[in-house]
Amino acid sequence: MAVYTQVSAEALSDFLAKFDVGELASAKGIAEGVENSNYLVDTSKSRFILTLYEKRVAEGDLPYFMALLEHLADKGLPVPPAVPDRDGTLIHQLEGRPACLIQFLSGVSVSHPTPAQARAAGEAMGKLHKAAEDFPLDRPNSMGVAEWQPLFERCGRDLDGIAPGLYDRAGKALDTILAAWPEDLPTSAIHADLFPDNVLMLGNRVTGLIDFYFACTDIRAYDLAVMHGAWAFDGKGENFSAEIGAALIEGYTASFGLSAAERAALPILAEGAALRFFLTRAWDWLNTPADALVTRKDPLAYMRRLDFYAAKGDALFA
Ligand SMILES: Nc1ncnc2c1ncn2[C@@H]1O[C@H](COP(=O)(O)OP(=O)(O)OP(=O)(O)O)[C@@H](O)[C@H]1O
Ligand SMILES: N[C@@H](CCO)C(=O)O
């Protein structure tokens, strides 16, 4: 249940009074998500998401995220910008936390995407990259390639407590990936976490791209590699769907394009993306008590993807 900070009805009414959004009608905590506290808020005029930013989102990064959302929304992308209050302020404080009132988008995230849905999602990422081309701000990737070695070292030998031999396996993969990491591919603002739970859909139509709190400046094709790993496998990373993987790339290529150099780099980018989620999940696994409110995500599901890409990536993306 991702409601870490409770918001009282009085505090919420006072907060909403700063906006031109009508009177508070109802509010309820949203169980999905693990990073922030989210509430579904209905007013006499409309429906909103209220997000209170918890530990993992740095307050100093919020202006970047909000500017990116506004930029993309202005270009017609289905992303949820923050709603300004009467003074034009987007980022507030509520119950001692940074908070934003966010536009509500309809749709549901699909847990088992069809190829048609994967194609539409790939297409949506292509449109996102098109719209981001002239976005002027930069944010280094706080979970990017430069962070993997330090994160691996922080996990250390405790990795072997997750599965025997995991420290050596991950260390070897890390060395291989760092040695082969591409230096000269185009970069831009990317989403960096476009998992199926961050794409809202109605049928085969994408109605929302959400959760931009890892957005950053990084290799553009890396975004597609993250998406590939998240969409084309089952949750455990045991079964790969070639059809879903191909549909994602086809959709992306149709709406944005993929250069020969980007395509050639996809195997290593996919290995890197798998390592990134393996490491952050492993760190969380080792540092979240098993009985915590938040469900820990299985790091091994990403080690399996990493093994898969290392063995089959070259043939897969050819
Ligand atoms: N703008 C929006 N419109 C409609 N629903 C939304 C919106 N933003 C968030 N939600 C809903 O709230 C849920 C949690 O949001 P979000 O994924 O941003 O949370 P989070 O805590 O950052 O989680 P995580 O990083 O684990 O995905 C989503 O799964 C979605 O159901
Ligand atoms: N998408 C990440 C969680 C952070 O949003 C994961 O599945 O590990």
Image: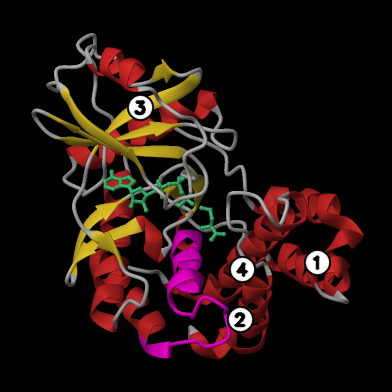
Q: As drawn, which residue projects farthest toward the left?
A: 45
Picture quadrant where residue 155 is located: bottom right
Do the residues under discs 2 and 4 have CB atoms within 8 angstroms?
yes
Q: Closer to us: mark 3 or mark 2?
A: 3
Mark 3, residues whose alpha carbon is within 10 Å: few (<14), some, or many (≥20)? many
The image's colour scheme reads secondary structure
Q: At 45% from the left edge and 37% from the top edge, which residue is drawn?
A: 37
Q: Magenta segment range?
A: 222-243
Residue assigned mark 4: 274
Could you give the CA–CA distance between mark 1 and mark 4, rounded to whole angstroms?
14 Å
Whether residue 159 is visible: yes
Vertical order, 128 against 63 (above or below): below
Measured from the top left, where is residue 281 in percent x and y? 66, 59
Measured from the top left, where is residue 274 in percent x and y? 61, 68
Could you give the CA–CA distance between mark 1 and mark 2, rounded to whole angstroms?
15 Å
Which is nearer the N-term, disc 1 or disc 4? 1
Residue assigned mark 2: 309
Picture quadrant where residue 296 is located: bottom right
Vertical order, 163 against 4 (above or below): below
